[in-house]
Image: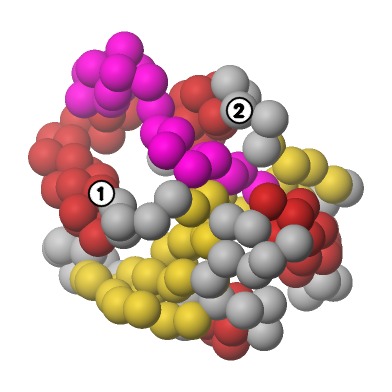
Amino acid sequence: RDEARRRFWRFNLGSAMRYPWVRLIDGAAALWVPPNGSELTDAEEAEVEPLLLELVGAHTEAFLKCLDLFASNHPRDEPHYYLSLLGTHDDYRGQGVGMQLLSENLALIDREGVACYLESTNPANVARYESVGFRLVGSFTLPADGPAVDTMWREARPA
């Protein structure tokens, strides 16, 4: 299970490396998709289902439904940076490293005067994201007793 998770995230991170918006500091990583970008290329999109069949087998259909929910709830009306991943290594949790990285990233985005969007499955993170200017704009629930996903937006801030 852990190996399957690592392989799936490596696949996503590998795709994101085509953008100059993968940010790292000791203990944390952030993956931003720039305005009008996509998480995966068309060729990579075609690889998702075969990869999932290999990694999760019979759960592939449920996983694809989850991905569809993320896609259908993603705003399309205004150009924005999309925080696809913000992760903190277990050894650094609770030390503010993730929020430090997020704040540094938002300062760079603010220089461009562009909005931002993210999703969170951890209700405790809503207040953290609100503290840096995001507001809750919606939510949806993943199938099969999955978690609720909060969607958050941060308006563009003039440089």
Q: Is residue 32 left or right of residue 142?
A: right
Compared with 26, 4 (above or below) is: above
- Residue under the image location 23 percent in, 71 percent down: 140
- Residue under the image location 42 percent in, 81 percent down: 136
Q: Amino acid at mark 1?
A: Ala
**Residue 132 on the magenta segment:** no
Residue 46 vs residue 35, the one in the foreground: 35
Q: Callout 2: few (<14), some (14-19), or many (20+) C-alpha neighbours within 10 Å?
A: some
Q: Classify mark 1: helix, strand or loop.
A: helix
* Residue 114, position as x, y percentages in the image: 58, 56
Q: CA distance from mark 2 to mark 1?
A: 20 Å
Q: How does the figure colour the protein chain or chains?
A: secondary structure
Task: Let me know if residue 88 appears in the view.
Answer: no
Q: Any mark on residue 91, and which?
A: none
- Residue under the image location 47 percent in, 61 percent down: 117
Q: Callout 1: few (<14), some (14-19), or many (20+) C-alpha neighbours within 10 Å?
A: few
Label count reads 2
Corner quadrant of residue 96: bottom right
Q: Any mark on residue 19, and which?
A: 2
**Residue 46 on the magenta segment:** yes
Q: Which residue is mark 1?
A: 71
Q: Classify mark 2: helix, strand or loop.
A: loop
- Could you tell me which quadrant the C terminus lies in? bottom right
* Residue 94, position as x, y percentages in the image: 78, 74
Q: Which residues are magenta?
A: 30-51
Q: Is residue 65 left or right of residue 121?
A: left
Q: Amino acid at mark 2?
A: Tyr
- Could you tell me which quadrant the N terminus lies in? top left
Corner quadrant of residue 4: top left
Sooner in the amino-acid sequence: mark 2 or mark 1: 2
Task: Let me know if residue 75 appears in the view.
Answer: yes
